């Protein structure tokens, strides 16, 4: 009788100790899995993919903050520079490979340099309108818009090649190429701004300061592009890195528009070297 009572106690003690052993061994596996950190290139590629598929998720991460936010500006900057660099090379490539190599870093400088000049204004405007974000969050939000612009330019690269091949024919093909480049850059920039505006509205934040800052960024970017021109260059002259400063970017843009209208109407004629119109055309290149 006593043997029948003591025999079941052995398996009961074993079964009770088994779950305890399993529970005690479980935490030993978790740190090993948590210790796996993806390499930096993979993180940059994943950030680029997330910007293309769901940029609002990146902006939500910026809004949430956290220590991982310190790594985000570098990833976004790489995405932006990649897009601007590729499009800059293809822009100069409409003339020659050497012009493309020269134009690529200049367009990268225009995109990132204009952001650096205008970034304090963005943070100041936001604070005046009640935005409660840190300077690092303001930098990340602006870089999200710039990286989206760069990735959009990267996606438009095949379209640009087809467009440039179709319109780049002498004597007026240059004007169509330059006007088309402004349209492509403007379209990509509008998408970057729209992504940021949409995310801020979802978060219930004001976007008035962002619209004012976008106009400021556009004017600074146009003038900076004028300073570091040419991006394509006059097909009849040797490739140069920089041209002397004359007139202004807005005067040259007006001249470029008139040249395109005249060429489409069949009224365009080469100007003499002494005319102001010819000087504006040459400088815009």
Image (tube, grey):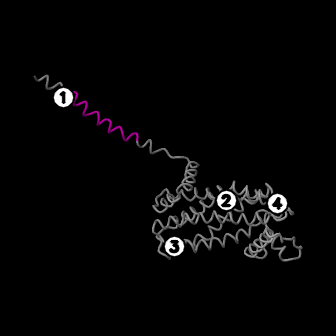
- Which is more N-terminal, label 3 or label 2? 2
Q: CA distance from mark 3 to mark 4?
A: 47 Å
Q: Which residues are magenta?
A: 10-29
Identify residue for label 1.
9
Which residue is the site of mark 2?
A: 84
Q: Which mark is residue 126?
A: 3
Whether residue 56 is visible: yes
Q: Nearer the viewer, mark 4 or mark 1?
A: 4
- Between the residue at mark 4 and the residue at mark 1, the CA separation in whole angstroms equals 95 Å
Rounded to the nearest angstrom, the CA distance separating label 1 from label 3 is 72 Å
> Residue shown at 70%/66% (left/top)?
182
Element under disc 4? loop
Q: Earlier in the sequence, mark 2 or mark 4?
A: 2
Residue shown at 58%/75% (left/top)? 212
Q: State which tag comes first along the sequence, 1 or 2.
A: 1
Q: Is residue 143 left or right of residue 160?
A: left
Q: Is residue 205 above or below residue 168?
A: below
């Amino acid at each position: 009788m006593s043997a029948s009572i003591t025999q079941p106690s052995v398996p009961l003690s074993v079964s009770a100790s088994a779950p305890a052993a399993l529970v005690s061994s479980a935490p030993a596996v978790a740190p090993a899995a948590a210790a796996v950190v993806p390499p930096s290139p993979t993180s940059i590629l994943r950030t680029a993919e997330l910007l293309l598929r769901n940029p609002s998720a990146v902006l939500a991460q910026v809004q949430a903050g956290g220590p991982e936010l310190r790594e985000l500006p570098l990833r976004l900057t790489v995405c932006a520079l990649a897009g601007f660099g590729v499009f800059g090379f293809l822009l100069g490539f409409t003339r020659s490979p050497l012009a493309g190599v020269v134009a690529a870093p200049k367009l990268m400088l225009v995109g990132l340099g204009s952001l650096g000049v205008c970034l304090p204004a963005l943070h100041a405007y936001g604070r005046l309108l009640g935005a409660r974000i840190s300077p690092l969050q303001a930098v990340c939000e602006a870089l999200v818009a710039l990286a989206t612009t760069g990735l959009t330019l990267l996606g438009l690269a095949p379209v640009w090649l087809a467009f440039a091949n179709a319109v780049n024919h002498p004597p007026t093909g240059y004007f169509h190429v330059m006007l088309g480049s402004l349209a492509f850059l403007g379209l990509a920039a509008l998408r970057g701004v729209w992504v940021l505006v949409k995310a801020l509205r979802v978060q219930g934040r004001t976007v008035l300061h962002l619209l004012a800052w976008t106009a400021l960024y556009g004017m600074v970017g146009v003038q900076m592009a004028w300073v570091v021109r040419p991006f394509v260059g006059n097909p009849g002259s040797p490739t140069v890195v920089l041209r002397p400063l004359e007139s202004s970017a807005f005067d040259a843009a007006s001249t470029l528009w008139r040249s395109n209208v005249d060429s489409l109407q069949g009224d365009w004629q080469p100007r003499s070297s002494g005319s102001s119109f010819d000087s504006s055309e040459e400088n815009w290149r």
